[in-house]
Image (cartoon, rainbow, N blue to C red):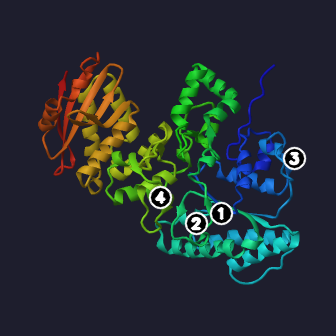
Amino acid sequence: MKEERVKYPIGEQDFRNVREGGYLYVDKTRFIETILSGGGKYYFLARPRRFGKSLFLSTLQYFFEGRRELFRGLYIDTTDWTWESYPVLHLDLNRERYAEPGLLDHVLDNLFRKWEEKYGIEYIAGDYSSRFSNIIEGAHRKTGKQVVVLVDEYDKPLVGNLNKDDNFEHYRQKLAALYSNFKSSAEHLRLVFLTGVSRFSKLSVFSDLNNINDITFDNAFADVCGITGEELLTNCTQGIRRLAEDMEIDFKEGLALLKENYDGYRFTKKESEIYNPWSLLNCLDKSEINNYWNETGFPTLIAESLKRINANLKDFFDSYTTESDLKGLDLLNPNPTALLFQTGYLTIKHYNSKVKVFQLGIPNNEVKEGLFKALLPYYVTTQRQPVKNLITTLVMAFILGDPEKAMKSLQTYFAGIDYALKMENENNFHNAFFLLIDLIGLETQAESHTSDGSIDIEIKTEDYIYIIELKYDHTAGEALRQIEDKRYSRKYQSDSRKIFEIGVEFSSKTRCIEEWKIKEI
């Protein structure tokens, strides 16, 4: 008998539709019990986009509406919850891009009209904050039950306008007034749960609610969004088998590919790595390894922030920071490290409990490839050779042991950069070179440390090892001598592969790779 194909909930964020439509659902209802047992009233959760925040809020909505039939067979149905029905106000701000100031009013008006009609609440003229307060109080009075407020992407109007001062301030004031009701209407509220990408500092929702429970870094909620390795094996073996069969590999190899490309997220001190659900489910549905998450967009604010502070990219992609630095985001001057973490381009790799410091890194191959391709045009823009063609040429040159051809391709590429956009300084050149080399997909390492110093770039293939030293306004001969004097190749003396040492000079006058010298070991 043919196995029935699994229906994956690609883009489906409504819990009722998932359950009634027969879609795969990874049971997260145990976290509802954790919330109930916590006894708190105000909760906040930050996670990157496409990580399942909206589906979890929808699950909360139907739970508090008492729709027990939707939860048959799930964990929460085994608890002693009385399945009471509460009035639920689900404020979904993910509906618009908020490019114009009036769009929030449009979203709020549509939602408020629906709630006023549902609970028989008289419309009152005035600002939206007062109207929201009237709805909360009215729903409590009409039903006799305290109100549950769920806010999906509470910060969406702000995130879309971080580089548009007038729009940003307009939305900041509107949202601050709207969210101030959570404190003033406390007696009418059973639960308030907000989700978003970032916990913005200087926004009244956090300054007014000093008892808000920020569960973003809480170990108890480490895997409330996303899919763990255990959940993957419990729920998705059919999809893994199908992927392996289509790629003509075994199950273990298929699992390893999924891990390399979509796993690696960690949001708390607890060592619990999480798969990106959007990418994982798309991959299993289409039975193809691809960059699904990156197709949903790249925040230009990240690249602009990195450029503004003249960041050394290698340092940012392997950095150390504290929890307080990651939690809040300064509205006027966003910290690129916090921005990269909160948007999902960096994640926790290790936590040192003695000094209370997180080590951050790029989660997986999918994120790295998408991030580097998105950043590259901010450092190099050329009218000649497309990046894709260059990468193909470089890959083949390094695999075939032809460093001369690889360096000529790089020189041609840098020579084609528009003059006005050429690298202004040494840091930009190192960033551009680092991004290009890492994108070739071979085994590469930047700033590899030895007993005598650090190697700028290492590239390894099945048959060859390349040791590259970059010099800005110093000769290629000097770069090559540094490799020899520091004996960088010594650590490979027992390796059977052929070694190429390459010194590279980049000139600030010509703003291009001036020359290179190659020594074969």
Residue placed at 50% from the left, 39% from the top? 366
Cα separation, mark 2 vs mark 3, equals: 35 Å
Q: Earlier in the sequence, mark 1 or mark 2?
A: 1
Q: Which-is-in-front pick, marks 3 and 4?
A: 4
Q: Are marks 1 and 2 in contact (CB under 8 Å)?
A: yes
Is residue 41 shown left or right of residue 510?
Answer: right
Going by the image, does 417 lie left or right of 392? Answer: left
Q: Nearer the viewer, mark 2 or mark 3?
A: 3
Determine the secondary structure under disc 3.
helix
From the viewer's perspective, is the residue at label 1 or at label 3 nearer?
3
Q: Which residue is mark 1?
A: 93
Residue 352's image quarter?
top left
Residue depth check, mark 2 versus mark 4: number of the one nearer the observer: 4
Residue that label 2 marks: 157
Going by the image, does 122 lie left or right of 268? right
Dot 2 falls on a residue whose secondary structure is: helix
At mark 1, the secondary structure is loop
* Residue drawn 49% across the image and 55% down it: 299
Disc 4 residue type?
Ser
Q: Which residue is mark 3?
A: 69
The local crowd at label 2, few if under 14, some if 14 to 19, many if 20 or more residues have their Cα within 10 Å, is many
Q: Are marks 2 and 4 in contact (CB under 8 Å)?
A: no
- Residue 312 position, x and y percent, is 32, 50
Decide: few, some or many residues near mark 4? Use Cα within 10 Å; few <14, some 14-19, many ≥20. few
Q: Of residues 434 and 223, which is closer to you in this image?
A: 223
